Image (cartoon, rainbow, N blue to C red):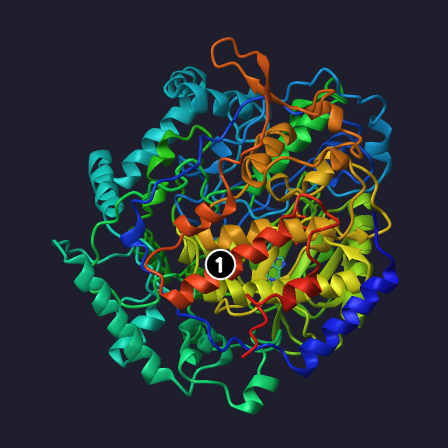
Amino acid sequence: MNSSSESYDEEGEIFETEVEKAPPSLPSVPGPSVDRLSNRNRGSRSPAISHNSDDARSTLSRHDRRDQDYQYRDCDYPRGEKRRRGDSRGDRGPDPRQHRVHYEAGGDPNYGRRPRVSYADIDRSDAREFPRQPYGNQDDRYCRELKRSRTRSRSPPRGPRGDASRGDNGRGSRGRGYYDDNRRENGNRYHEKDTARHDESRKHSREQSVSEQGDFSESSKRDAENRSKVPDRTSSVVRKMANGSRNVPNEKGPLKRAHQEPEIEEPVDEAKLIEERRKKREAIKAKYRGQATPLLVSALGLSDSTPNSPAESIATPVTPSSRENTPADMFIISKDGVPAPVETPAPQSPIDHDSPSAADYDPTIDMQEDAKRGQEHRHVKEVSSAVYDETKTTVKDVLFPSVTEQNQGKLDKADDDDFDMFAEGDDDDMFAEPLSKPSRKEESESTKVVPVIPAAKQLDVSLLDNWDDPEGYYRVILSELLDNRYRVQTNLGRGMFSGVVRALDQATNQQVAIKIIRNNETMKKAGMKEIEILKKLCAADPDDKKHLVRLERYFEHKGHLCIVFENLSINLREVLKKYGRNEGISLGAVRSYAQQMFLGLSLMRKCNILHADLKPDNVLANENCSMLKICDLGSASDASENDITPYLVSRFYRAPEIILGIPYDYAIDMWSIGCTLYELFTGKILFTGRTNNQMLRSIMECRGKFAHKLLRKGQFTGLHFDDMLNFRSIEKDKITGKDIIKTMNFNKPTRELRPRLLAAASGMTDAESKDLNLFIDLLDRCLNLNPEKRCTPVEALKHPFIHRVK
Ligand SMILES: Nc1ncnc2c1ncn2[C@@H]1O[C@H](COP(=O)(O)OP(=O)(O)OP(=O)(O)O)[C@@H](O)[C@H]1O
């Protein structure tokens, strides 16, 4: 199915010409301010998500990176987890390398906790085998080949797991499916089992965590209040614009968090309110007309009434260049881009209640489940619980000196201020880490509270006998000098393969992100492959215009391969969390992001590279979120290495041809981008399923049935369809817990794209609706069930949603 490389090159050239000659401007982008309140009562056509059934099994190839964390386990490469910036795992024992430092005093009390309604609660697997699974002798392949099965995304708040041997107390694979299934299927059973299984110390921790939060009823009350308020979807920049001042008190960042809402609620004439908002938006447009960046023009829809000058229409790129750093207050992401002095209480949207929030989704868990599925039937006897405990890491990997009293105060206060209504249920989470203070505060706090960083120092090797933690991650010490050049500043996160730190390059005085690969040969080899691919991509984009993360250089440090990248900020899931939780972000921002991602994909296609793990978590933004880079090329491969494997790509972003075992190509990345764009606009995950089988169901509910011709090409079609090519939905009986098979047909899709997207928009002007229709059309093309008919990146860039011809 792979197209010839010539055709890609050709497309690349076409694209190059287009972009460099006359990048499309977005002259008539309507404002992103979407007042959705008026449409909140639209009915949802979404049926309940199925959470049942196990996945069908199929032969796994060496490309099955998604499952390979279990390979590592078998190979004594215990799997790690990603952790977020400022991740606080509590103290640990003394580190031999500590030089009068102690652990980072950061970390949100909610950091180690999963929101009650996170997707992780839904997407569990008890990983039973589908009887027809032809697994055979895959074990060797798993251990033999280096492929990345990775928990790709940065995990949302999550705490350290308990002792692996307990098996029921951690949040790793141990018992997850069990508890989550019970929680999902039988509500309170979860609590009963939870209580029964927790050891005393755990209970104590919980009690403590509750008491640390203060009176629980108070907390609930506060939560209820928060829930009753309309999320603040107004960016601070808009507020600034409206006030004509750049100094707005109480701002935490470029865009204020959704739940920081006006305290007062009073009955509001909604029509009047909408009218007021429109007027204000017009005032903002008037004020900034003529001085906005193209992106702002796009986001505010200024060009509606201000046609581009000829020069602009030729030369002004619609998106910021990769190197451009638009000021933070010039990019509006949230849908409601206007100030709202008094918000009406937000009625619960009837739309897509059953779709998990994209912001809450933890793809790490998703990956674990897929991996577990593959593992259980291959190595179940070989895998010890200790090795299986991929999440037990509790040490900080960057050791910080004491925060000053002043900073400590700030941290505490920040914690208090930042009450997160979405984290309310965390005490119910048996997997949650007991609160540790002070807490995370993610991005904004990491910039607000700067620990005192000692002077850079080269560590004395003779003092140290163990650089690595038990899982092979390098234990970095704050201010340690790497390669005699990079001074470590902070911890950015952990992936399956590496710990990532931010460091100051003393040669250039620029910040960089350094991926410190775990210490083993397999991972080093994987890192080298990533480097080769990045080199190829960077060489093909010397001007850094194609929105792919830049590799700067690499070196070895104490046995670890270290890859130096340009420094970026948060990923798109975090963007959604901050500015579009459950609501999605503005269409203008989605357009800008889409264009940047398609530019990146077009370059990859030109270089014959498949990313194979595109999702919001693997797209990083710059500080003001106006510019994106596609990151984490750890699963990328040459397009010719397209061995059939059913678990390639994170499940929700996995194209149907992968599940069906049809030879795949670049189109898998377009599918993933389509899912990602939907998620950005709606704040919901488009296709969800606990298993590949249920993914197919979810896909068909939305996209209709597969052509028989296509199904006949699939190696794994028989796992999901009967001889007549009717879909066999493998679900779990709620009473007996046994698998039941339902034959289903999808002649009439029940959860089509259009109504779901329309439901995510409200109060749109005619121009905005027109734009939305274009967006729907683009998604329709990205999500064609037939990969051969799916649009290419170049076609997407030419699509009228993105390429705006006047
Ligand atoms: N260039 C960068 N700038 C800022 N942060 C980064 C950068 N690269 C990576 N990070 C942070 O480090 C985390 C881990 O990075 P990455 O996903 O590339 O690591 P990994 O070990 O390959 O993980 P995975 O298991 O997903 O493959 C990211 O989620 C991100 O938060």
Q: Quadrant of residue 130?
A: top right
- Seen from the viewer's position, the closer of residues 451 and 209 is 209
Residue 116 against residue 686 in the figure, above or below: above
State whether residue 455 is above or below residue 113.
Answer: below
Is 85 in front, or is 532? Answer: 532
Q: Nearer the viewer, residue 362 or 608?
A: 608
Q: Is mark 1 within 8 Å of ligand 1?
A: no
Locate residue 576, reporting x and y percent.
46, 54
The reply to whether residue 479 is in sight is: no
Q: Identify the secondary structure beneath mark 1.
A: helix
Apparent side of residue 658 relative to residue 62 in the rendered image (left or right)? left
- Residue 26 on image: x %, y %: 52, 75
* 473 to the left or right of 423: right
Give the residue at x 44% y 39%: 113
Amino acid, disc 1: Asn
Q: Residue furthest front?
A: 747
Q: Nearer the viewer, residue 124 or 351?
A: 351
Q: Is residue 199 above or below residue 21?
A: above
* Residue found at x 73% / y 60%: 563
The residue wearing badge 1 is: 773
Q: Quadrant of the C terminus?
A: bottom right
Residue 715 image-quadrant placement: top right
Q: Position of residue 414 (x, y in %)?
A: 33, 56
Q: Classify the position of ligand 1 by quadrant: top left, top right, bottom left or bottom right.
A: bottom right
- Categorize mark 1 by other alpha carbons within 10 Å: few (<14), some (14-19), many (20+): some
Q: Residue at x 58, y 21 (%)?
A: 53
Q: Is residue 317 visible?
A: yes
Q: Name the outermost residue toward the left.
A: 267
